[in-house]
Amino acid sequence: MPGRRCGPGRSRWRLGLPDEAAKREGLRSKLKRLVERGWAREEGPGLFTVTEPVAREVARQADG
């Protein structure tokens, strides 16, 4: 959600992926791709968050 920044290391942990450098780098490239497509924002080197429209849509769907 907005305001909750996390990098590939923490994202990997939240998703239950193994702690391997190759996995972190793969996740980093996927997060950068989401930034390019407007789904996420990179707020600092390696710190990513979802954009407001995406966060609103996820919240709307969670509320059912």
Image: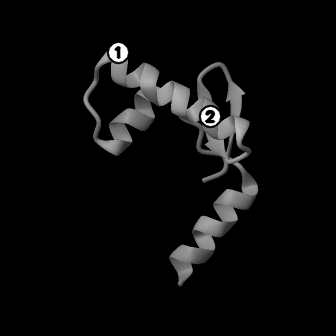
Cα distance between the residues tagged 2 and 1: 18 Å
SS assignment at label 2 = helix
Residue name at image x 56 percent, y 34 percent = 31
Residue name at image x 54 percent, y 26 percent = 29
Looking at the picture, tell me which residue is in the foreground, 38 or 56: 38
Residue name at image x 62 percent, y 75 percent = 60
Q: Which residue is most to the left?
A: 18
Q: In this view, does 30 lie to the left or right of 39?
A: left
Residue name at image x 74 percent, y 45 percent = 38
Residue 48 visible, this angle: no
For marks 2 and 1, the one nearer the N-term is: 1
Using the image, tell me which numbered label, if any, was put on residue 33: 2
Kindly identify the amino acid type of the residue bearing the numbered disc 2. Answer: Arg
Q: In this view, does 7 lie above or below 25?
A: below
Q: Which residue is most to the bottom?
A: 64
Looking at the picture, tell me which residue is in the foreground, 43 or 33: 33
Q: In this view, does 46 lie above or below 51?
A: above
Q: How crowded is mark 2: few (under 14 residues within 10 Å), some or many (20 or more)?
A: few
Kindly identify the amino acid type of the residue bearing the numbered disc 1. Answer: Ala
Q: Residues within 10 Å of mark 1 (few under 14, many from 20)?
A: few
In this rendering, which labeled residue sits more in front, label 2 or label 1?
2
Instruction: Report which residue position mark 1 lands on.
Output: 21
Residue 49 visible, this angle: yes
- Residue 26 position within the rendered picture, expressed as x and y whole percent measured from the top left: 44, 25
